[in-house]
Amino acid sequence: MDALASLPPTSTGSGGTGRPGYRRAADAGGAEMSVPGETTIGILEHEQLIGDDQILIAAPDEVKIAVAVDSGAVENVIGQEDLPGSVHVASNTTGRHFVGASNEHIENYGSCDTVLASEHGEVSCEWKVADVSRPLHSISKMTGPADGPGTHDVLFTNRRAVVVPPGIVDKIMMHIKPLVQYDRQGGLYVAEMTLSGFTRPGQGR
């Protein structure tokens, strides 16, 4: 099956509270780390790393994880402590790291391939191994490149989110009109809106 994937863009800086699921890295003095010339990825952004060609995870061969799906992520990300011992992590050789929604530095250690099993079957998943506090699945990675037919559609309700074959949303939209539409921009889904401090007559907020 097609691999699922994850995270998005910003730039470095200081201050602010970290986005849920992201851990802030600090230097020895407790200040946020900042590296100039980063490349934006959405909710996370890229920076620099030195490491071995491969990181070996000392853990059980199989673990259970709780993955959050994230429309604000442009890569699938997972922390080293959440990986089983059977997984080999290829070190980050690009020098690119991440920056969170509050401009906090998030270390990118490398990447790995895994298999995820649930009551619905098995899927392959490529991850970026990063300094995050919980695994995140990127919707833009699940749905595939913006310029192609797509690999999956993702649907949300107030109770659940489901990954379904591509084209389902297009069929639904043939029969209904959206209340709001967020168009794909890179790894994010974005809507430009006019913000005001009051409700216009006849409009909801």
Image: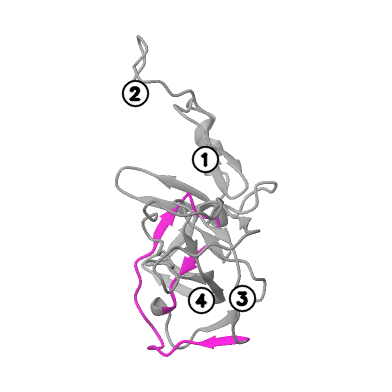
Please say whether residue 61 is one of the residues in the magenta stretch: yes
Q: Quadrant of the N terminus?
A: bottom right
Residue closest to the eye, 187 or 9? 9
Q: Residues within 10 Å of mark 4 (few under 14, many from 20)?
A: some
Where residue 15 sits in the image (x, y, percent)?
A: 41, 52
Residue carrying label 2:
205
Residue at image coords 39%, 54%? 19
Question: In which image quadrant can residue 36 be found?
Answer: bottom right
Q: Which residues are magenta?
A: 53-80
- Name the residue beneath numbered marker 3: 92
Instruction: Identify the residue at image location x=39%, y=76%.
Output: 82
Label 2 and label 3: CA atoms lie apart by 44 Å
Are there few (<14), some (14-19), or many (20+) residues within 10 Å of tag 3? many
Which residue is under mark 1? 169
Contact, CB < 8 Å: mark 2 with mark 3? Answer: no
Q: Position of residue 172 (x, y in %)?
A: 50, 35
